[in-house]
Every structure is written in C-alpha cells, then in structure tokens.
Image (spheres, rainbow, N blue to C red):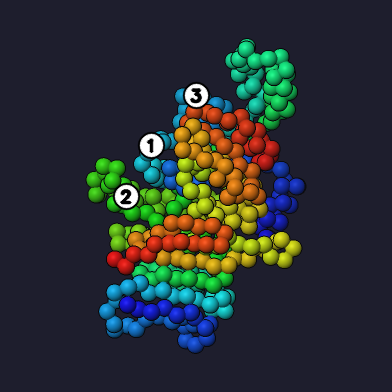
Amino acid sequence: MRGALSRLIMALFFRKKSVKIGIYGPPNAGKTTLANRIIHTFVDDNEDMGVATEIPHETRRVIKREGVLIDLKRLILNSNSNININISSGNRNRERSTRRSRGRAKLMFDIVDTPGLATKIDFRDFMAYGLEEEEAKRRAKEATEGVIEAIKWLDDIDGVILLMDSTADPYTQTNVVIIGNMEARGIPVIIAANKIDLPDATPHRIINAFPQHRVVPISALKGDNMEELYEEMAKVFR
Amino acid sequence: MKKWQRSSGEGEEGVMKGGGSEERTGIEMNVVSRDKVESMGSMEKLRFILDGVKSGNIVVLEGGLTAEEQMKLIELTMLEVDDSFTGIEISGYPARRGLLNLRKKTRLTIIGPAAKMKTIKKDKDLISAIISAT
C-alpha cells in the first residue's frame, strides 16, 4: 500500500521521460520473442534482445535495452501503403479513423526481458532436450539465479507486460503471484495472451481467468495484433 | 503411514507432525491454523514452510500467504534448489477483497515438494492435486 502511494506521488510530481517496462511470465511463454518483435519494429530489424528456443529457461539473465520509442503514427504511416486496396470505402474510413486515434500513441521506454518465473527447476527436464548432464545442471543453476534476478528487478520496474501462453492453463500460481505483487506495488500490468497463431490457442481462457485486467491476444512470433498491444502500452504505461 | 492433524494454534508448535521413529510409508501433511500462521513473522513463516517441504511434507496454511510472501518464498526456494530438491509446488485459493475493497485477504495456501505434488486443476474454490508417496 505504501509502495503504491509513493509510486502515485512520484508519477504525479516527477514524471519520468522514460519508463522501465518488464516482460514477465512463465518459461516458454515467448518473452524474448516479444522483446525481439518490439526491437525489430521500433529500433532495428537486425537487432535481437536475446535468443529464443523451445528449451525452457533459455533466458537466464535479465537483458535491458534502453531508449525504445513506440511511435504508432510512424508505424502506421509506414504500413499505410500496405493497406489492402480491396476493402470497401466504408471499411476504409473506419480503418483510417481507428488508425488516426491509435496514431497519437507514443511512449519512450526501456525494455527489460526477464528469465521465466518458476517454482521448480529440475536439471533432468533439460536432459529431455538432449543436453548432457553436466550442461543440464549448469543450466538449472543459472536458471535459479535468473528467477531470483527477475524477482529483484521488480523493485525497479514501472510497468509489466505479463506474457502468458494461450495454449496453456492460465491459472497457475506463478501468474497469480505476479499479478498479486504488481497490484500490491501499484505497478500497472497488461496481460498479453501470446501464441494465438497456434491452432489450440484459447486466449478467452486467459480473459476469463483475469477479468479485472486488460488482456491483449497477440502472436509475438507472427506479429498478429501487435498494434493493439503497442496502443495499450502507450495508454497504460505513459 | 503417518497421519495428519489440524493445528490448534496452541502448544509448542501449533502443528501436528507424525512420530519420529516410525518408518515413513506415506506423506506427512501439516495443516497450520490461521492463529498459528498469524502469530509468525514473514521470514519465520517462510522458513517453517520451506523446512517442512524440504523434509518431504505437504504444508497447508489456513489464511494462506500474501502475494508478496509467495514471491519471497519462490526466491528463497530458488536459493535452495539442487540436484535432490527441485523446488516447490504451490497452490492457493484466489484472495478475496477485504474492507473497502483495499486489502486482499488470502484464504488458503498449499505447498509441497515439486517432486511429489502436482496441481492438476484449480478454480476459485477447488484445488485438485496429485500427491505421490515415492
């Protein structure tokens, strides 16, 4: 409660030029893929925040990239030439109107890609992906350190994108704990329901599980619905 | 097989544990009363839980843990994960809003060793878990 109050006072009187936005979530939710997508879109198409693989806990250190500017006006201007010319004039007007309102959204921020939060880490799970025992044990050790680092970073974060896998059960204690902590600290949260490109994705389960929070269904890998997420970020984290 | 019993919140520990000398063939479960939980400081509570879980026990807390305490428990757990202790499984009923919708009241939290306990289904009033004795 005291943390939330001091954050409110800081936000009112000492507005930051740039905010730190942390991407949190369980392992393999697609956090690094999302971070890379944001960097490719707004910074440099050839720059990566980190490496994304199917092996859990690939990211085992917090990675920060400073000075990312979400500028939807510029993004829309760049993509206007790609609007499908077959849409009807009415639809086109609605599309333009929506894009004009979105086009005002701007946000300067530092992006913080964090290791996946977990309550258990077993080196034998990594061996199932073909890692040798010694390598698996080293990865497990680094993964535990990564979880601790991610938790410590919460003290310095101004906003959180909580990334969940739309194909998995959303009601895990890890997700609940992250949301509970953000609420207690007064840190704004956007839930992004990732992997909607997969056939078994059910983002409505996430929407139903956390009705008090804004949930944006996305595919960080394919880039689906990312504009909506950027708009929400500019609105919530400003 | 050891038995479990609800804690009264009184006495030396406020928690019933199985006898020390008998050979363990099942899972020990410690159910801790709200009075006992509230009498402990945060770190004392977390140490109590982690010591119990590392010994292979299931710990059930009436009144539960706050979100901050659960995050701290995850952090402490990670410090102690090794080849034999792979971490914890934690599950709880969602918190209910308290007075003026400000303070969240936790209801119940169950914590066990990840190697023995697996939550299979959870909703706002039901937790289903599989607990393996081996």
Image height check: is A75 above or below A154? above
Closer to viewer: mark 3 or mark 1? 1
Task: Read off the chain for label 3.
Answer: A
Give the residue at x 50% y 76%: B32
Give the residue at x 39% y 62%: B130
Picture coordinates of residue A165, whole percent (x, y): 49, 42
Residue under pointer 2: A125
Q: Quadrant of residue B68?
A: bottom right
Q: Which disc is residue A222 wearing?
A: none
For marks 3 and 2 on the same chain, the one whose residue lies earlier in the sequence: 3
Q: Are marks 2 and 1 on the same chain?
A: yes
Q: Quadrant of residue B59?
A: bottom left
* Label 2 CA crowd tier, 10 Å (few <14, some 14–19, many 20+): some
Badge 1 amino acid: Thr
Which element carries disc 1, helix, strand or loop? loop
Residue under pointer 1: A53
Task: Read off the chain for label 1.
Answer: A
Q: In the drawing, does residue B82 fall left or right of residue A67?
A: left
| Mark 2 and mark 1: Cα distance apart in space | 15 Å
Picture coordinates of residue B105, whole percent (x, y): 63, 66
| Mark 3 and mark 1: Cα distance apart in space | 19 Å
